[in-house]
Image (tube, helix red, strand yellow):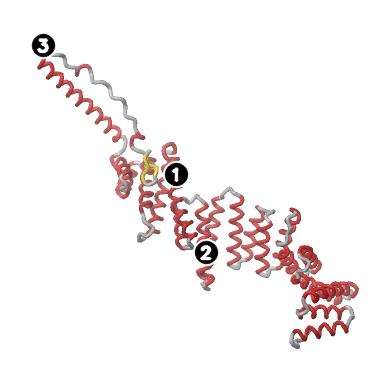
């Protein structure tokens, strides 16, 4: 089989078998004359000439027979493809399809002609995007028809050419991404999806390139353009899911990516639904769950943030993979729970931070404030015994914090309020005065 610019194009010989040529009939043999040696030689030469003409006629007839198996348009189409005269090949092929619309050979060679046109097209040519898209679409159609109509002849070759068409534009898109030319990358990935609409990678990479463009528009304050581009990303990602990659990790990644896009669109219900699909497929993926928790924490959706942090950290605890990096996660969990007035749970989360980082001043302070608020809550409920227990714990933390940094006014303020709660009014007065002095005379409670 011969190739034309990367296309699988067989030679005509693969479509017909030339029968072996029989020997000339015995009647063509010329007997020697008795009239002399010269006459005999002359007649022998005449016989040889006659035999040669007969043999040539047979060969010509066989060739014409092979070509005659196909229309002249179909034959011309094949020749034009091999000569890279693609427009003429397409014209001849179109005429051949009128005569026989279900001919796999014709569809294949028309596909090859359109692929050849796209291969020869410079990406700097005027109208490159529209021309390439149109030719790729037609090439894919005809290669697919050839596979349907003549699987044995064109199944493998058709698939190889579709892969080649896709690969050419996909690789250009990858180069565009590496060069931070996201417009170019988006165009080439889009052309890759036209070259092979059933290859999910084209849609996924197109989504990545377009999202880069969307982010740039958002930074410029162009909300309308951001929305239009991010909606395009969502369509691409949903198309990946429609194709069904059969790879769980890919599917998880796509659902998470959908969640990210919806999150950036401030569509939190849609974001949560997409995130949940990802987590459902990968429930032990604590990094994924922590990412989702962070998203809702930043959106100040404390209920969802707390739930996701608890899920992720419980997985890590069960797998025994908690490390120092989780101080931030436990701290965020404690803050979210504190915002929800779930003080006991918040204090438990802060305690876990302190097991990993005993002198973490932010956590010590947050725990002190939470204990103070829990004491205040108990005092309002008339449970002074419980309230004083909380105040006393908070005072102890205040002592520790002031020992670390005595110039932080908030430490003095909270400790002073807690001392007031346990009835140490003199101590409370001293702490609150120190607070006011550090704040430059600002009010206390």
Q: Residue at x 27, y 32 (%)?
A: 63
**Which residue is at a point 55% across and 57% down the rendered structure image?**
237
Measure the alpha-carbon separation of dots 1 and 3.
69 Å
Q: Earlier in the sequence, mark 1 or mark 2?
A: 1
Residue 307 x, y percent position in the rendering? 72, 62
Q: Which numbered disc covers residue 160?
A: 1
Q: Is residue 267 above or below residue 409?
A: above
Residue of label 2: 212
**Distance from the alpha carbon under mark 1 to that under mark 2:** 32 Å
Front residue (pair 432, 224): 432
Res 133 quadrant in image? bottom left
Residue that extends furthest to the right in the rendered view of this protein: 385
**Residue position marked by numbered label 3 in the rendering:** 34
Q: Is 376 placed above or below 96 here?
A: below
Query: Number of labelled discs?
Result: 3
Q: Residue furthest top?
A: 34
Q: Where does residue 94 sit, x and y in percent of width and height?
A: 33, 46
Q: Quadrant of the C terminus?
A: bottom right
Instruction: Give whichever of discs 1 and 3 has the lower sequence position.
Output: 3
> Foreground residue, 375 or 94?
375
- The answer to which quarter of the image holds residue 22 is top left
Q: Is residue 72 left or right of residue 213?
A: left
> Do the residues under discs 1 and 2 have CB atoms within 8 angstroms?
no
In screen coordinates, is 372 left or right of 206? Answer: right
Position in image of residue 72 (x %, y %) = 28, 40
Q: Is residue 341 left or right of residue 19?
A: right
Residue at image point 45% right, 40% down: 156
Determine the residue positioned at 59% across, 49% down: 247
Secondary structure state at the residue bearing disc 2 = helix
Q: Are marks 1 and 3 in contact (CB under 8 Å)?
A: no
Q: CA distance from mark 2 to mark 3?
A: 98 Å
Query: Residue 198: percent from the left, percent from the top?
Result: 50, 50
């Amino acid at each position: 089989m011969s190739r034309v610019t990367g296309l699988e194009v067989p030679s005509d010989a693969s479509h017909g078998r030339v029968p072996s040529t029989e020997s000339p009939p015995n009647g063509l043999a010329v007997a020697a004359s008795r009239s002399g040696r010269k006459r005999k030689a002359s007649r022998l030469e005449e016989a040889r000439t006659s035999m040669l003409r007969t043999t040539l006629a047979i060969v010509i007839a066989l060739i014409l027979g092979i070509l005659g198996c196909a229309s002249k348009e179909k034959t011309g189409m094949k020749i034009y493809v091999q000569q890279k005269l693609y427009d003429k090949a397409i014209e001849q092929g179109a005429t051949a399809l009128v005569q026989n619309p279900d001919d796999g050979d014709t569809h294949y060679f028309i596909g090859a002609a359109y692929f050849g046109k796209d291969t020869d097209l410079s990406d700097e040519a005027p109208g490159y995007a529209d021309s390439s898209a149109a030719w790729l679409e037609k090439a894919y159609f005809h290669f697919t028809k050839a596979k349907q109509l003549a699987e044995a002849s064109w199944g493998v070759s058709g698939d190889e050419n579709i892969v080649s068409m896709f690969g050419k534009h996909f690789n250009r898109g990858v180069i565009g991404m590496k060069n931070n030319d996201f417009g170019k990358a988006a165009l080439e990935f889009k052309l890759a999806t036209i070259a092979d609409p059933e290859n999910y990678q084209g849609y996924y990479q197109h989504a990545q390139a377009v999202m880069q463009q969307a982010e740039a528009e958002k930074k410029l304050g162009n909300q309308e353009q951001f929305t239009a581009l991010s909606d395009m990303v969502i369509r691409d990602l949903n198309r990946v899911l429609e194709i069904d990659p059969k790879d769980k990790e890919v599917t998880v990644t796509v659902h998470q990516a959908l969640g990210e896009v919806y999150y950036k669109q401030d569509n939190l219900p849609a974001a949560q639904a997409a995130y949940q699909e990802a987590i459902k497929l990968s429930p032990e993926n604590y990094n994924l769950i922590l990412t989702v928790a962070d998203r809702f924490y930043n959106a100040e959706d404390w209920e969802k943030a707390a739930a996701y942090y608890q899920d992720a950290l419980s997985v890590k605890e069960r797998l025994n993979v908690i490390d120092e990096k989780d101080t931030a996660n436990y701290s965020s969990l404690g803050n979210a729970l504190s915002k929800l007035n779930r003080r006991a749970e918040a204090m438990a989360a802060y305690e876990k931070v302190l097991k990993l980082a005993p002198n973490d001043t932010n956590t010590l302070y947050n725990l002190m404030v939470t204990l103070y608020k829990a004491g205040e809550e108990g005092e309002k409920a008339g449970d002074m015994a419980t309230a004083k227990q909380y105040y006393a714990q908070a005072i102890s933390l205040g002592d520790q914090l002031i020992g670390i940094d005595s110039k932080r006014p908030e430490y003095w303020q909270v400790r002073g309020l807690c001392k007031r709660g346990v009835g140490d009014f003199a101590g409370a007065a001293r702490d609150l005065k120190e607070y006011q002095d550090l704040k430059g005379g600002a009010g206390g409670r």
